[in-house]
C-alpha cells in the first residue's frame, strides 16, 4: 500500500502578541525544521470602521488605523527578533481587518501549506462576545490547520 506524503513548504503562524502564544513557537520551529519550510508570521488588528458610524471623522479613523499598523510592524519586528533564532527569522506581515478573514486571505495569497493556530480556550460569555478565530479558520480553511492550546502546555 502506497501513501502519498505531504510536505509543508510554507507555514503560517498567526499571532496576537500574547504571552501564551510564545509557547507555540517551539512547535512552529520544529515543523519548519522537519519540512525545511519557511515560516510566515501574521498579526491582524481589527479595524475601527465602526467608529465612522458614530460621527468620528473618516480622516481621524484612517490616521488611527495607519498608526496601529505602523506600531504593529514595529512590534512584530521585536517579537520575531526576541523569539526566533537568527537563522529561522520568519516572513512578517501585518493586516487590518477581521482576523479570521485576513488569515484565510493570507493563506490563499501566499500559497501557505499549513497554519499553526493558537486558541485562547474561551468559554461562555467571553466566547460569545469574542468568538473563536481558531475555530473560524479551522472551519473555513482549505489547508491543514494545527490548533494548539498554549494554556495546556
Image: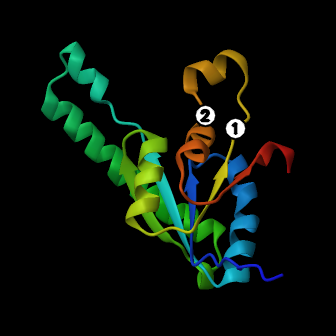
- Front: mark 2 or 1: 2
Query: Which of these two is toward me, 141 or 106?
Result: 141
Considering the numbered disc 2 on the image, is that residue within a helix, a strand or a loop?
Answer: loop
- Identify the disc placed on residue 60: none
| Chosen colour scheme | rainbow
Residue at left offset 80%, top offset 43%:
151
Query: Which of these two is toward me, 119 or 108?
Result: 108
Query: Which of these two is toward me, 50 or 82?
Result: 50
Residue at left offset 27%, top offset 38%:
64
Report the residue marked by disc 2.
132
Q: Is residue 124 above or below residue 138?
A: above
Q: Report which quarter residue 46 is drawn in.
A: top left
Q: Report which quarter residue 37 is drawn in.
A: bottom right
Considering the numbered disc 1 on the image, is that residue within a helix, a strand or a loop?
Answer: loop
Q: Is residue 75 above or below residue 36?
A: above
Distance from disc 2 to disc 1, alpha carbons, whole Å, reads 8 Å
Q: Is residue 5 above or below residue 19?
A: below
| Residue 18 in the figure: left or right of residue 91 | right
Query: Which of these two is toward me, 77 or 107?
Result: 107
- Identify the disc placed on residue 120: 1
Query: In the image, residue 87 lies at what x, y percent?
Result: 61, 85
Pointers 2 and 1 in contact (C-beta within 8 Å): yes
> Which numbered disc flags the more N-terminal residue, 2 or 1?
1
Q: Is residue 130 above or below residue 65?
A: above
Query: In the image, residue 134 lies at what x, y percent?
Result: 62, 43
Residue at left offset 43%, top offset 44%:
101
Q: Residues within 10 Å of mark 1 (few under 14, many from 20)?
A: some
Q: Residues within 10 Å of mark 2 (few under 14, many from 20)?
A: some
Query: In the image, residue 98 lies at what x, y percent?
Result: 42, 38
| Residue 112 in the figure: left or right of residue 122 | left
- Number of numbered discs on residues: 2
Amino acid at each position: 500500500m502506497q501513501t502519498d506524503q505531504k510536505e509543508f513548504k510554507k507555514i503560517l503562524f498567526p499571532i496576537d502578541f500574547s504571552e501564551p502564544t510564545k509557547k507555540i513557537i517551539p512547535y512552529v520551529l520544529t515543523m519548519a525544521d522537519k519540512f525545511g519550510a519557511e515560516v510566515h508570521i501574521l498579526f491582524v488588528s481589527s479595524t475601527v470602521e465602526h467608529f465612522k458610524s458614530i460621527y468620528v471623522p473618516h480622516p481621524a479613523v484612517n490616521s488611527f488605523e495607519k498608526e496601529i499598523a505602523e506600531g504593529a510592524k514595529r512590534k512584530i519586528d521585536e517579537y520575531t527578533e526576541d523569539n526566533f533564532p537568527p537563522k529561522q527569522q520568519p516572513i512578517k506581515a501585518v493586516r487590518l481587518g477581521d482576523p479570521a478573514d485576513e488569515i484565510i486571505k493570507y493563506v490563499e495569497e501566499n500559497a501557505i501549506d499549513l497554519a499553526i493556530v493558537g486558541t485562547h480556550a474561551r468559554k461562555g460569555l467571553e466566547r460569545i462576545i469574542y468568538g473563536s478565530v481558531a475555530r473560524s479558520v479551522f472551519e473555513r480553511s482549505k489547508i491543514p490547520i494545527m490548533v494548539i492550546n498554549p494554556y495546556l502546555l
